[in-house]
Amino acid sequence: MARDFTLSACLGVTGTDDVSIQNDGRKWTVKVSNVKQYEEWTEDAAEAQAAEAQRLSGGGTYKLAAGKNVLRFLPPKVGMKSPFVTVTQHYLEAGQKKVSFVCPRMAKRQCPACEHADKLSNSGLGQDFEVAKQFNSKLRFFGAVVDRANEELGPQVFPFGKQIHDQLNAIRRDATIGGNFTHPDDGFDIVITRVGTGMQTEYTVAAARNQSPLHQDPAVAGDWLERSPNLARYALVPNPEQLKRTLGAVPEFGAMARQLEATAARAPRNAGDDAVAGAGAKEWTGDD
Ligand SMILES: [Zn+2]
Protein backbone atom coordinates (compact mmCIF):
# COMPACT_ATOMS: atom_id res chain seq x y z
CA MET A 1 0.00 0.00 0.00
CA ALA A 2 1.38 3.38 -1.02
CA ARG A 3 1.75 5.95 1.75
CA ASP A 4 1.43 9.64 1.19
CA PHE A 5 4.25 11.68 2.73
CA THR A 6 3.41 15.07 1.30
CA LEU A 7 3.43 17.90 3.91
CA SER A 8 -0.29 18.53 3.62
CA ALA A 9 -1.10 14.87 4.13
CA CYS A 10 1.17 14.69 7.22
CA LEU A 11 -0.43 17.80 8.74
CA GLY A 12 -3.95 16.93 7.69
CA VAL A 13 -4.25 20.20 5.78
CA THR A 14 -7.34 20.68 3.62
CA GLY A 15 -7.87 23.07 0.69
CA THR A 16 -9.54 25.78 2.77
CA ASP A 17 -6.78 25.96 5.41
CA ASP A 18 -4.09 28.64 5.53
CA VAL A 19 -0.60 27.28 5.98
CA SER A 20 2.33 29.47 6.99
CA ILE A 21 5.93 28.33 7.38
CA GLN A 22 8.37 30.45 9.39
CA ASN A 23 12.07 30.14 10.17
CA ASP A 24 13.40 32.11 13.16
CA GLY A 25 17.04 31.09 12.48
CA ARG A 26 17.00 28.08 14.80
CA LYS A 27 13.92 26.15 13.89
CA TRP A 28 11.10 25.90 11.37
CA THR A 29 7.51 26.48 12.49
CA VAL A 30 4.56 25.38 10.41
CA LYS A 31 1.23 26.99 11.28
CA VAL A 32 -2.04 25.64 10.00
CA SER A 33 -5.05 27.84 10.42
CA ASN A 34 -8.54 27.37 9.10
CA VAL A 35 -9.68 30.77 10.37
CA LYS A 36 -10.19 32.96 7.26
CA GLN A 37 -8.19 36.18 7.52
CA TYR A 38 -10.17 38.08 4.91
CA GLU A 39 -13.63 38.50 3.36
CA GLU A 40 -14.65 38.22 -0.25
CA TRP A 41 -15.67 41.64 -1.74
CA THR A 42 -18.81 40.73 -3.65
CA GLU A 43 -20.57 42.54 -6.47
CA ASP A 44 -23.65 42.86 -4.24
CA ALA A 45 -21.58 44.59 -1.57
CA ALA A 46 -20.08 46.99 -4.12
CA GLU A 47 -23.55 47.81 -5.43
CA ALA A 48 -24.96 48.35 -1.93
CA GLN A 49 -22.05 50.64 -1.11
CA ALA A 50 -22.60 52.73 -4.24
CA ALA A 51 -26.29 53.06 -3.32
CA GLU A 52 -25.44 54.09 0.25
CA ALA A 53 -22.90 56.66 -0.98
CA GLN A 54 -25.53 58.13 -3.29
CA ARG A 55 -28.10 58.22 -0.48
CA LEU A 56 -25.70 59.97 1.89
CA SER A 57 -24.50 62.49 -0.67
CA GLY A 58 -28.04 63.80 -1.13
CA GLY A 59 -29.26 61.58 -3.93
CA GLY A 60 -28.40 61.24 -7.56
CA THR A 61 -30.25 62.19 -10.69
CA TYR A 62 -33.10 60.02 -11.88
CA LYS A 63 -33.12 59.19 -15.56
CA LEU A 64 -36.24 57.62 -17.05
CA ALA A 65 -35.79 54.02 -18.14
CA ALA A 66 -37.40 52.74 -21.34
CA GLY A 67 -40.90 51.45 -20.56
CA LYS A 68 -42.59 51.87 -17.20
CA ASN A 69 -41.19 54.03 -14.37
CA VAL A 70 -43.05 54.11 -11.05
CA LEU A 71 -42.13 57.28 -9.17
CA ARG A 72 -43.24 59.01 -6.01
CA PHE A 73 -42.89 62.79 -6.22
CA LEU A 74 -41.92 64.48 -2.99
CA PRO A 75 -44.01 67.48 -1.84
CA PRO A 76 -42.66 71.06 -1.99
CA LYS A 77 -40.05 71.76 0.64
CA VAL A 78 -40.94 74.29 3.33
CA GLY A 79 -40.88 77.74 1.74
CA MET A 80 -41.66 76.45 -1.77
CA LYS A 81 -45.05 76.71 -3.53
CA SER A 82 -44.53 73.96 -6.07
CA PRO A 83 -42.77 70.57 -6.01
CA PHE A 84 -41.06 71.65 -9.24
CA VAL A 85 -38.58 74.31 -10.17
CA THR A 86 -39.02 75.71 -13.67
CA VAL A 87 -36.18 77.18 -15.69
CA THR A 88 -35.35 78.12 -19.24
CA GLN A 89 -32.07 76.47 -20.08
CA HIS A 90 -29.60 76.57 -22.94
CA TYR A 91 -27.80 73.48 -24.26
CA LEU A 92 -24.93 74.37 -26.52
CA GLU A 93 -22.44 72.30 -28.46
CA ALA A 94 -18.94 72.97 -27.21
CA GLY A 95 -16.65 70.81 -29.29
CA GLN A 96 -17.06 67.19 -28.15
CA LYS A 97 -19.30 67.99 -25.20
CA LYS A 98 -22.44 70.01 -24.45
CA VAL A 99 -22.67 72.83 -21.98
CA SER A 100 -25.86 73.94 -20.27
CA PHE A 101 -26.81 76.95 -18.21
CA VAL A 102 -29.91 78.71 -16.96
CA CYS A 103 -30.82 81.57 -19.31
CA PRO A 104 -29.72 84.90 -17.77
CA ARG A 105 -32.93 86.48 -19.12
CA MET A 106 -34.69 84.68 -16.23
CA ALA A 107 -33.00 87.27 -14.03
CA LYS A 108 -33.70 90.01 -16.60
CA ARG A 109 -30.07 90.05 -17.67
CA GLN A 110 -28.43 90.03 -21.05
CA CYS A 111 -28.14 86.55 -22.61
CA PRO A 112 -25.64 86.10 -25.47
CA ALA A 113 -27.24 82.78 -26.52
CA CYS A 114 -30.73 84.30 -26.80
CA GLU A 115 -29.34 87.36 -28.61
CA HIS A 116 -27.54 85.09 -31.08
CA ALA A 117 -30.75 83.09 -31.64
CA ASP A 118 -32.78 86.29 -32.13
CA LYS A 119 -30.30 87.63 -34.66
CA LEU A 120 -30.36 84.38 -36.65
CA SER A 121 -34.13 84.00 -36.67
CA ASN A 122 -34.54 87.64 -37.77
CA SER A 123 -32.19 87.27 -40.76
CA GLY A 124 -35.03 86.11 -43.00
CA LEU A 125 -32.97 83.13 -44.21
CA GLY A 126 -34.46 79.66 -43.82
CA GLN A 127 -31.19 77.97 -42.85
CA ASP A 128 -30.50 80.62 -40.19
CA PHE A 129 -33.87 79.91 -38.65
CA GLU A 130 -32.93 76.23 -38.33
CA VAL A 131 -29.57 77.06 -36.72
CA ALA A 132 -31.29 79.49 -34.35
CA LYS A 133 -33.18 76.58 -32.79
CA GLN A 134 -29.92 75.23 -31.33
CA PHE A 135 -29.37 78.48 -29.47
CA ASN A 136 -32.88 78.98 -28.15
CA SER A 137 -33.52 78.20 -24.50
CA LYS A 138 -35.78 75.30 -23.58
CA LEU A 139 -38.17 74.85 -20.69
CA ARG A 140 -36.82 72.49 -18.09
CA PHE A 141 -38.33 71.29 -14.85
CA PHE A 142 -36.74 69.73 -11.78
CA GLY A 143 -38.59 67.65 -9.20
CA ALA A 144 -37.62 65.27 -6.41
CA VAL A 145 -38.65 61.63 -6.70
CA VAL A 146 -38.24 58.26 -5.08
CA ASP A 147 -37.90 55.47 -7.63
CA ARG A 148 -40.22 52.73 -6.33
CA ALA A 149 -38.02 50.10 -7.99
CA ASN A 150 -34.94 51.37 -6.11
CA GLU A 151 -36.22 52.90 -2.89
CA GLU A 152 -32.88 52.31 -1.17
CA LEU A 153 -31.48 55.19 -3.26
CA GLY A 154 -33.79 57.62 -1.44
CA PRO A 155 -34.87 60.95 -2.98
CA GLN A 156 -33.33 61.81 -6.35
CA VAL A 157 -33.47 64.90 -8.54
CA PHE A 158 -35.59 64.31 -11.63
CA PRO A 159 -35.11 66.70 -14.58
CA PHE A 160 -37.88 66.60 -17.17
CA GLY A 161 -39.38 68.50 -20.07
CA LYS A 162 -42.64 70.18 -20.94
CA GLN A 163 -44.35 67.03 -22.23
CA ILE A 164 -44.14 65.38 -18.79
CA HIS A 165 -44.76 68.58 -16.87
CA ASP A 166 -48.02 69.34 -18.64
CA GLN A 167 -49.38 65.87 -17.87
CA LEU A 168 -48.29 66.05 -14.21
CA ASN A 169 -49.91 69.45 -13.86
CA ALA A 170 -53.13 68.17 -15.42
CA ILE A 171 -53.28 65.35 -12.86
CA ARG A 172 -52.77 67.85 -10.04
CA ARG A 173 -55.43 70.25 -11.29
CA ASP A 174 -58.20 67.70 -11.84
CA ALA A 175 -59.37 66.05 -8.63
CA THR A 176 -61.37 63.44 -10.55
CA ILE A 177 -58.26 62.02 -12.20
CA GLY A 178 -55.84 62.70 -9.36
CA GLY A 179 -55.22 65.67 -7.13
CA ASN A 180 -52.15 66.41 -5.05
CA PHE A 181 -50.13 63.29 -5.74
CA THR A 182 -47.17 64.63 -3.76
CA HIS A 183 -48.97 64.50 -0.40
CA PRO A 184 -46.94 62.25 1.96
CA ASP A 185 -50.03 60.62 3.52
CA ASP A 186 -52.78 60.54 0.92
CA GLY A 187 -50.88 61.16 -2.31
CA PHE A 188 -50.18 58.48 -4.89
CA ASP A 189 -47.46 57.19 -7.19
CA ILE A 190 -47.05 58.37 -10.76
CA VAL A 191 -46.36 56.01 -13.64
CA ILE A 192 -44.34 57.48 -16.53
CA THR A 193 -43.94 55.34 -19.61
CA ARG A 194 -41.16 56.17 -22.05
CA VAL A 195 -41.49 54.96 -25.62
CA GLY A 196 -39.05 55.68 -28.45
CA THR A 197 -35.75 57.59 -28.49
CA GLY A 198 -34.35 60.99 -29.47
CA MET A 199 -36.77 63.52 -30.92
CA GLN A 200 -39.40 60.79 -31.30
CA THR A 201 -39.57 59.98 -27.57
CA GLU A 202 -43.11 59.90 -26.18
CA TYR A 203 -43.95 60.09 -22.49
CA THR A 204 -47.24 58.98 -21.00
CA VAL A 205 -47.94 60.08 -17.44
CA ALA A 206 -50.61 58.32 -15.37
CA ALA A 207 -51.77 58.29 -11.77
CA ALA A 208 -51.33 55.01 -9.91
CA ARG A 209 -54.71 53.45 -9.19
CA ASN A 210 -54.32 53.43 -5.42
CA GLN A 211 -53.63 56.13 -2.90
CA SER A 212 -50.55 55.35 -0.79
CA PRO A 213 -48.35 56.97 1.82
CA LEU A 214 -44.87 58.14 0.84
CA HIS A 215 -43.65 55.13 2.88
CA GLN A 216 -45.41 52.69 5.23
CA ASP A 217 -42.83 53.43 7.91
CA PRO A 218 -43.23 57.06 9.07
CA ALA A 219 -39.54 57.14 10.07
CA VAL A 220 -38.47 56.38 6.49
CA ALA A 221 -40.98 58.89 5.08
CA GLY A 222 -39.64 61.51 7.48
CA ASP A 223 -36.08 60.75 6.48
CA TRP A 224 -36.96 61.14 2.79
CA LEU A 225 -38.71 64.45 3.39
CA GLU A 226 -35.69 65.70 5.26
CA ARG A 227 -33.32 64.52 2.52
CA SER A 228 -35.46 65.90 -0.29
CA PRO A 229 -32.99 67.78 -2.52
CA ASN A 230 -32.99 71.57 -2.56
CA LEU A 231 -34.21 72.26 -6.08
CA ALA A 232 -33.71 76.04 -5.91
CA ARG A 233 -30.07 75.59 -6.85
CA TYR A 234 -31.13 74.36 -10.30
CA ALA A 235 -32.66 77.77 -10.96
CA LEU A 236 -29.49 79.73 -10.28
CA VAL A 237 -28.65 82.09 -13.10
CA PRO A 238 -24.93 82.15 -13.89
CA ASN A 239 -23.22 85.44 -13.15
CA PRO A 240 -21.34 87.09 -16.04
CA GLU A 241 -18.05 85.58 -14.88
CA GLN A 242 -19.46 82.01 -14.87
CA LEU A 243 -21.24 82.65 -18.16
CA LYS A 244 -18.04 83.84 -19.77
CA ARG A 245 -16.28 80.65 -18.67
CA THR A 246 -19.11 78.43 -19.96
CA LEU A 247 -19.45 80.24 -23.28
CA GLY A 248 -15.69 80.33 -23.75
CA ALA A 249 -15.94 76.63 -24.74
CA VAL A 250 -18.56 77.28 -27.43
CA PRO A 251 -17.00 78.21 -30.81
CA GLU A 252 -19.74 80.70 -31.80
CA PHE A 253 -19.12 82.74 -28.67
CA GLY A 254 -15.41 83.41 -28.78
CA ALA A 255 -16.00 87.09 -29.52
CA MET A 256 -18.99 87.26 -27.22
CA ALA A 257 -16.97 85.90 -24.31
CA ARG A 258 -14.66 88.90 -24.69
CA GLN A 259 -17.64 91.24 -24.89
CA LEU A 260 -18.95 89.69 -21.67
CA GLU A 261 -15.72 90.49 -19.95
CA ALA A 262 -16.69 94.13 -20.12
CA THR A 263 -20.16 93.32 -18.72
CA ALA A 264 -18.64 91.25 -15.90
CA ALA A 265 -16.60 94.22 -14.75
CA ARG A 266 -19.78 96.25 -14.25
CA ALA A 267 -21.93 93.49 -12.64
CA PRO A 268 -22.35 93.01 -8.89
CA ARG A 269 -20.11 90.31 -7.38
CA ASN A 270 -22.83 88.02 -6.03
CA ALA A 271 -25.06 88.22 -9.09
CA GLY A 272 -25.01 84.42 -9.44
CA ASP A 273 -26.84 83.93 -6.16
CA ASP A 274 -30.19 85.01 -7.55
CA ALA A 275 -32.57 82.12 -7.09
CA VAL A 276 -35.59 82.40 -9.31
CA ALA A 277 -37.61 79.84 -7.34
CA GLY A 278 -40.36 81.59 -5.44
CA ALA A 279 -40.97 81.37 -1.73
CA GLY A 280 -44.32 81.50 0.03
CA ALA A 281 -47.11 79.11 0.99
CA LYS A 282 -46.36 75.40 1.04
CA GLU A 283 -49.49 74.01 -0.56
CA TRP A 284 -49.14 73.20 -4.23
CA THR A 285 -52.14 74.27 -6.27
CA GLY A 286 -50.84 73.27 -9.68
CA ASP A 287 -51.23 76.79 -11.02
CA ASP A 288 -47.55 77.40 -11.56
ZN1 LIG B 1 -30.99 82.94 -23.00
Image (cartoon, rainbow, N blue to C red):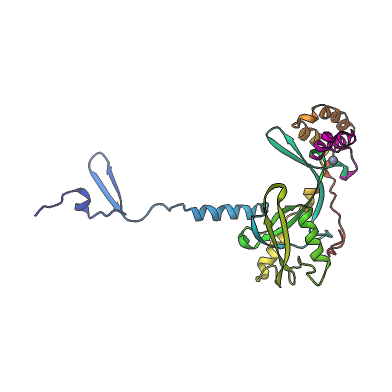
Which residue lies at the image location 86% right of the left edge and 54% below the top edge? 278
Give above or below for 216 relative to 44: below
**Looking at the image, how many numbered discs can be counted on the residues?**
0
Q: Position of residue 56 (x, y in %)?
A: 64, 54
Image quarter for ligand 1? top right
Q: In the rendered image, which quarter is residue 151 located in?
A: bottom right
Which residue lies at the image location 59% right of the left edge and 55% below the top edge? 52
Closer to us: 72 or 17:
72
Q: Is residue 220 left or right of residue 179?
A: left
Closer to us: 265 or 131:
131
* Magenta span includes 132: yes
Quadrant where the N terminus sits is bottom left
Q: In the rendered image, which quarter is residue 186 located in?
A: bottom right
Q: Where is residue 187 in the image (x, y as percent from the top left)?
A: 74, 69
Q: In the rendered image, which quarter is residue 158 located in?
A: bottom right
Q: Single out the residue that lies furthest toward the left.
A: 1
Q: Where is residue 229 in the image (x, y as percent from the top left)?
A: 73, 55
* Magenta span includes 215: no
Q: Single out the residue that lies furthest toward the front.
A: 126
Q: Is the magenta stretch mostly helix, strand or loop?
A: helix
Q: Is residue 259 visible?
A: yes
Closer to us: 241 or 92:
92
Give above or below for 76 relative to 213: above
Q: Can residue 76 be seen in this view?
A: no
The boundaries of the magenta stretch are 106-133
Q: In this view, does 176 lie to the left or right of 42?
A: right
